[in-house]
Amino acid sequence: MKKIVALSIIAAALAVSACNTISGVGRDVSAAGSAVTGGAESAKR
């Protein structure tokens, strides 16, 4: 029973850290997209 609880806690910790990592990647991709959009708008003028 203790092993199951310990494994559950470890799995939950990994899931939370993965979500934070994915969230960070999403912000980075969004920032890169904004930079490309800004460059395209500047090139139009």
Image (cartoon, rainbow, N blue to C red):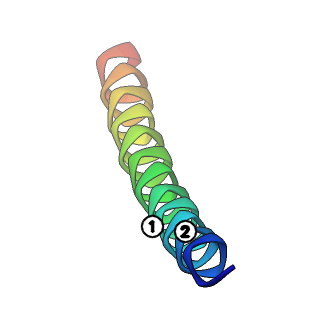
Q: Residue at x 34, y 37 (%)?
A: 32
Q: Amino acid at mark 1?
A: Ser
Q: Residue at x 49, y 46 (%)?
A: 26
Foreground mark, 2 or 1, reads 2
Q: Earlier in the sequence, mark 2 or mark 1?
A: 2
Vertical arrangement, residue 40 with respect to residue 24, above or below: above
Number of other residues with Cα within 10 Å of mark 1, as a class: few under 14, some 14 to 19, many 20 or more? few
User: Residue 41: horizontal and vertical position, in percent?
Assistant: 43, 26
Q: In the image as oriented, which residue stretches furthest toward the front?
A: 1
Local SS, label 1: helix
Near-viewer residue (25 or 31): 25
Q: Residue at x 55, y 63 (%)?
A: 11
What mark, if any, has residue 17 been given in the picture?
A: 1
Number of other residues with Cα within 10 Å of mark 2, as a class: few under 14, some 14 to 19, many 20 or more? few
User: Residue 33: horizontal and vertical position, in percent?
Assistant: 43, 32
User: Residue 44: horizontal and vertical position, in percent?
Assistant: 40, 15
Quadrant in which the N terminus is drawn:
bottom right
Calculate the distance from the C-alpha at mark 2 to the C-alpha at mark 1: 15 Å
Q: Is 3 left, or right, of 33 in this rendering? A: right
Near-viewer residue (40 or 44): 40
Question: Hey, which quadrant is residue 19 in on the image?
Answer: bottom right
What mark, if any, has residue 34 been given in the picture?
A: none
Q: Which residue is mark 2?
A: 7
Question: Hey, which quadrant is residue 34 in on the image?
Answer: top left
Local SS, label 2: helix
Quadrant in which the C terminus is drawn:
top left
Vertical arrangement, residue 22 with respect to residue 16, above or below: above
Q: Amino acid at mark 2?
A: Leu
